[in-house]
Amino acid sequence: MELVTPAFGLVFWMSITFLTVLLLLKKFAWKPILNMIKEREESIEKALSSAEKAKNEMASLKASNEKILSDAKLERDALLKEARELKESMINEAKGKASAEADKIVAAARETIANEKLAAITELKNQVATLSIEVAEKVLRQSLANDEKQKAYVKQLLDEVKLN
């Protein structure tokens, strides 16, 4: 049993050594260790507070980003709507101009056709008058005494006119 139970001297010297080490640690090492623990605790507190602050800033930035994004979407939609309206107004204006130009061209064509028709009618009347004068001239040149000869000659001239 001597191995299991220590002797009184061993316990005494172990206690004195323990108390000496404890006093030395208390005098020289305990304060720096506690100070380091306190500093570490403060740095952890600062890190946690800065993390919380960063989290709040991130939430704020996220909210402002969402607001900016929604504003940008609204502005984009407004620009697209304005562009569509501008496109439609330009198309309508172009259609109106094209219609007005087509009306002008049609009116000018009708006027040209009417003028050419009048010119053709006038020319036709002039040709009929010329032919009538020629027929009358030829009839007069024939002897007016003979009626049968005159009728045959007029019929011949009319047949010639139909051939032309």
Image: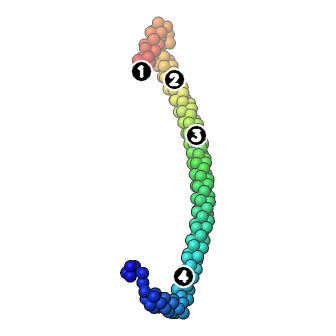
Question: What's the distance in space between the residues labelled 2 and 3, CA to CA?
Answer: 42 Å
Quadrant in which the C terminus is drawn: top left
Foreground disc of the pair 4, 3: 4
- Contact, CB < 8 Å: mark 1 with mark 2? no
- Contact, CB < 8 Å: mark 4 with mark 3? no
Kind of residue indicated by mark 3: Ser
Foreground disc of the pair 4, 1: 4
Question: What's the distance in space between the residues labelled 2 and 4, CA to CA?
Answer: 132 Å
Q: Which residue is mark 4?
A: 37
Question: What's the distance in space between the residues labelled 1 and 2, CA to CA?
Answer: 12 Å
Q: Choose the circle earlier in sequence order: 2 or 4.
A: 4
Q: Choose the circle earlier in sequence order: 1 or 2.
A: 2
Who's the residue at 61% across and 61% down the image?
63
- Does dot 4 land on a helix, a strand or a loop? helix
Who's the residue at 61% across and 54% down the image?
74
Q: Position of residue 71 (x, y in %)?
A: 62, 58
Kind of residue indicated by mark 2: Val
Q: Is residue 32 above or below residue 130?
A: below
Image mark for residue 99? 3
Image mark for residue 128? 2
Q: Is residue 54 above or below residue 9?
A: above
Q: From the viewer's perspective, is 127 left or right of 49?
A: left
Q: Choose the circle earlier in sequence order: 2 or 3.
A: 3
Question: What's the distance in space between the residues labelled 3 and 1, CA to CA?
Answer: 45 Å
Foreground disc of the pair 3, 1: 3
Question: What's the distance in space between the residues labelled 4 and 3, CA to CA?
Answer: 90 Å
Kind of residue indicated by mark 4: Ile
Kind of residue indicated by mark 1: Asn
Who's the residue at 46% across and 15% down the image?
158
Crowd around label 3: few <14 · some 14–19 · many ≥20 (10 Å): few
